[in-house]
Amino acid sequence: MALVTGASRGIGRAIARALAERRATVVGAAREDHARDVVDELVAAGYRAEAASLDVTDAASVTNTVASVLDRFGRLDILVNNAGITRDQLALRMKRDDWDAVIATNLTAAFALTQAVLKPMIRQRSGRIICIGSVVGQGGNAGQANYAASKAGLIGFAKSVAQEVASRNITVNVVAPGLIETDMTRAITDDARAEWAERIPLKRLGTPDDIAAAVCFLASDEAAYITGQVLAVNGGMYM
């Protein structure tokens, strides 16, 4: 049983699909009914999936969503903290509201969701928690101080919680994507994309499926002895 936040598009959509293809029951969560399309697609293909309306920045929404999943399925084995936003600006000009919004969505929400699933995972003495970080959280990026701080915070958060719950057979890890082909990167110019690709040793942008494969590995039995780690999937962009 897997709960994937930010499942409506891009990386989250690919993760939901990949987990379903590996026979997990997937709850795809997003604001309002935005995850309905991907869930309908999975169900039509014969997989087990349901949609959930979730505002990750709202404490009641988080609590209610996790409670609903537990009530419906009786357990929760995998949490993927994927929901995230950007509000880019140079630090000198960044508005406090843009800082707060990014931290709330990218970091505080991961804490809230993780906290909500820990008790049931501890009771069942198993669980996989996977946070989607970023290469920016490892190397920084001008104009993204808020985003970089939130993603770097996920790394420290995951390592700390991993130590707290390891004795209960719960692993906590981070997948840190590099530059990935999503709606966000498709909005940049062809010249900018080519420039970025040239900086990447593998000479291409990654795909959402590249990230989904890493998540599925960390969620699998094969990764049972891996916790508190950052799995960088960036084509060599940051080493």
Image: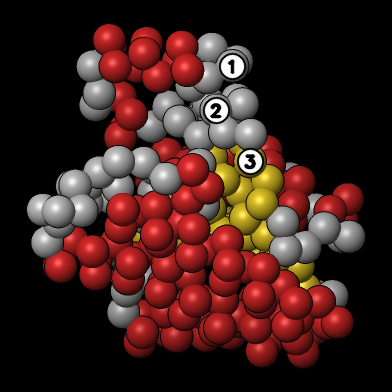
Q: Please rate how many residues cluster around mark 2, counting C-alpha atoms within 10 Å: few if below 14, some from 14 to 19, many from 20.
A: many
- Is 216 placed above or below 125 here? above
Which residue is tagged 3? 232
Specify the amino acid type for callout 1. Pro
CA gap between label 3 and label 2 equals: 9 Å
Quarter holding residue 166: bottom right
Q: Is residue 128 above or below residue 146?
A: below
Residue at mark 2 to residue at mark 1: CA–CA distance = 6 Å
102 relative to 135, above or below:
below
- Element type at mark 3: strand
Residue 147 vs residue 11, the one in the foreground: 147
Check disc 2 and report the residue beneath it: 237
Q: Mark 1: few, some, or many residues within 10 Å (few <14, many ≥20)?
A: few
The local secondary structure at tag 2 comes to: loop
Q: Position of residue 162 (x, y in %)?
A: 72, 73
**Left or right: where does residue 184 sit relative to residue 129?**
left
Q: Quadrant of the C terminus?
A: top right
Of residues 105 and 52, which is closer to you in this image?
105
Q: Residue drawn 53% across and 53% down? A: 132
Tell me whether the residue at label 2 lies in contact with that at label 1, contact meaning CB atoms closer than 8 angstroms.
Answer: yes
